Amino acid sequence: QTGEGTATSSGVVTIRSANSGAAGASGKLVFSSGTSKGGNSGAIVMGTGAATGGRGGLVSISAGSGTSGVGGLVSIASGRSTSNTGGTISVSSGEGTATSSGSVTIRSTNSGTAGVSGKLVFSSGTSKDGNSGALY
């Protein structure tokens, strides 16, 4: 936690692993809640505070570039359940109470000179009992 800024900005918290040497990989950051045997497991919450006199904050998740291999991977997956419905992933834009709501953009970027652009796959899973999921 940083100090409060009563007249200007509050402080900055930086969590990072150091750069690697010439022949290694940089360190790994692990944010994890523990498992639970008798109830719900913990939660990891990332977010920014509301702004009354300016824009709302930014949460950005990105993976690094690769110069001699493929670029980094960003993977978002919800939890599996053996006795109930699996977890949900929800992506939505912000509401604009006075004007338009925000946009949701899912895209593959342009290819280089010797390749093709990436593909987008929207797929529902198979079902063992009943209809499979729907795409709208």
Image (cartoon, rainbow, N blue to C red):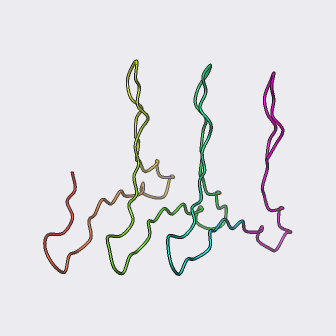
Q: Nearer the viewer, residue 135 or 46?
A: 46
Q: Which residue is depicted at the point 22% across and 56% down?
A: 135
Query: In the current view of this chain or complex, which residue is farthest to the right?
Result: 21
Image spot of residue 2 (x, y percent): 82, 42
Q: Quadrant of residue 59?
A: top right
Whether residue 60 is situated above or below residue 86 in the rendered picture: above
Q: Residue at x 19, y 81 (%)?
A: 128
**Is residue 112 located in the magenta-colored stretch of the structure?**
no
Tell me which residue sits at (67%, 61%) in the image. 67
Q: Is residue 10 magenta?
A: yes
**Which SS does the magenta portion mostly show?**
loop
- Return the residue nearer the eye: 107 or 57: 57
Q: Residue furthest left?
A: 130
Image coords of residue 132 (percent x, y)? 18, 69
Q: In the image, 21: left or right of 29?
A: right
Magenta-highlighted residues: 1-28
